[in-house]
Every structure is written in structure tokens, then in C-alpha cells.
Amino acid sequence: MIKIENLYFMYEQSAPILRNLSLCVPKGSIYGFIGSNGAGKSTAIRCILGLLLPESGSIHVMGLNQPENRQEIIKRTGFLIEGPHFYANLTCYENLKLFKFYYKVDRNRIEVVLKKMGLWEFKDRLYGKCSTGMKQRLGIAKSFLYNPDLLILDEPLNGLDPEWIVETRMILKDLNYNFGTTIFLSSHILSELEKVVTHIGMLKNGQLEFEGPIHHFVKETKTKSMFIVLESIENLSKIDCPPGITLIGQQENCLEFFIEEKSNLNEFLQNLLSSGVNILDIKTSEIGLEDTYLKNNSL
């Protein structure tokens, strides 16, 4: 759906933002685009939409060259970048009505998307009088107003309350599963991203550090976090950890370990018991997208 090869971009009198970036977004996927601030995510998105022209490299969207076919690409792409932008003196309904004429969609489609985003009862409210969350929801509503083949969303969860974060997640899954919409999604809320994406692209210093199915990204470390609560640590003079198990934190009598090699876990627990301590509780948790990202991004 999106194919970028050797993309190079820099702003005037600045260091390069994108350094020979290459990525591939499969058709029908929900692609999570992650990276720290300044990594180049927003710049890459602007290049994909033809808002910025790179110095070199190629961009193909839905098989069409960008920027030569920008108008055709835009007509088939829904997007929300850098927050919503509407006329403050028009109502929610009137703002979407402007796009109805450009994209030639039925009038009832406005009602459909406003209801999906919980805004139908506020359709006559002036945009300038809307709350931050309502403005964001209107921006998301506008992005899928015309049933796009491709949806590009940059930080769509900004300003949303927990209820609408969950609701938006379900709407995106529905668009992808029932309508075949390919979704390119950038967000810093990795715990939410993990619940919806099928693929991950991790950008670092303008280059792609990883690209592939999300389960490959998370399983690369094959690790768990383990918490052991001891009755007392008074008699614990030293903790001997076998290879693949590391003590990473301690708070009073609760110890946290990082497990990279589970085959040594039984030996480790037996050694801990033989040291004369009583274990009150053991809890483990799988390392998710957020933990894996932080580990990889700190390298």
C-alpha cells in the first residue's frame, strides 16, 4: 500500500531528518509507526502525503508515484496530521459538509461518522466552542468520511479521554476488518498501539531500525519481568543470578528480575531458597511493545 525507497530529506540549513529511509506497508495492515520525538515520523508522513518533497528517493502510495499523482492519492486517503483543522465559526456538521462536496459522498455519510464518534448530538455546535477531545474526534470523523482505501493518522489519541481511546481503537479495527482499510498509525501511546496494530516500523535518527509483524518485534527479546516478594531480606547477603537472569530493581523486600533465559529459572529459584529466605509471592509479566521499544531504543 505504501512503499518508500531510499528517502532522504533535510530542511534548509539543518541536519538530515530522513536518511535513506525505506519502508513497506502491506495492503490491509494496521501499521504502527513509532519512534522518539525528532526521529522523523511527522516528516515521513508529510512526504507520503506529498506535503514535503524529498531530496532523493521514491514514494509509491497505492501503486501511484508521489508527488506526480498527489491529487489522486489524496482523494483515496483519509488523514489526520498535527491535530484537526476546521473553521471555528462553522458547526461540526457544516465543517464536514465542505468535505462532502469535494469527495462527493452522500449527505447521510456525515451523520454516520458523527454518530460513530459520538458527535451527532453536537452537530450544531460551533467548532470554536468544542472541547479539545471533541475537536480531535471530529478530525478522526473527517478522516474516514469518504471510506478511504488508506488512512494515515498522526497521534490520533491526543486529547481523548479513556472511553474514547477505547472506542477509537474499536472503530479503527472495524474499518480495517470490515472495510479493508489500510491504516498507517503513529502514536506515542504504545500500550494502545499494541492492541490494534498488525505491523511495526520503528524509526530512529531518520532510519528504520525494525520493520515487520508486531509479534516478531515483541518476541525478539523473548523476555519476562519477574517480581519476587520475600518475607525478609535480612539473611540475604548475595543474590547469585545464572546467565540470562538479572536483578534490575529492589524496593524493600520486593525484588524485580529481568528474564532472558527461562531455562535457568528453576535453578535460580532453588538457589534463592537455599540461601535461607522465605518467598511469599512470585509474579511474572510478559514484556510488551512499550518495554521492547524502550529496550531497543536505549541501545
Image (spheres, rainbow, N blue to C red):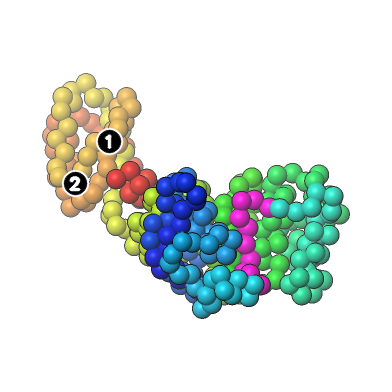
Is 80 left or right of 291, judged from the image as shown? right
Q: Residue at x 67, y 66 (%)?
A: 144
Residue 298 lies within the magenta run: no
Q: On the image, numbered disc 1 is attached to which residue? A: 248
Residue 275 position (above or below residue 114): above
Q: Nearer the viewer, residue 128 or 116?
A: 128
Q: Give amino acid for label 2.
A: Gly
Q: Is residue 96 visible?
A: yes
Residue 147 position (above or below residue 121): below
Element assignment for label 2: loop
Residue 276: x %, y % from top left? 16, 29
Q: On the image, numbered disc 2 is attached to which residue? A: 244
Image quarter where the C terminus lies is top left
Quadrant assignment, res 229: top left
Q: Residue at x 72, y 50 (%)?
A: 135
CA distance for labels 1 and 2: 12 Å
Judged from this view, the residue extending furthest toward the top is: 234
Residue 191 position (above or below residue 30): above
The stretch in magenta equals 73-84
Element assignment for label 1: strand
Q: Give amino acid for label 1.
A: Ile
Q: Nearer the viewer, residue 155 or 71?
A: 71
Q: Is residue 288 visible?
A: no
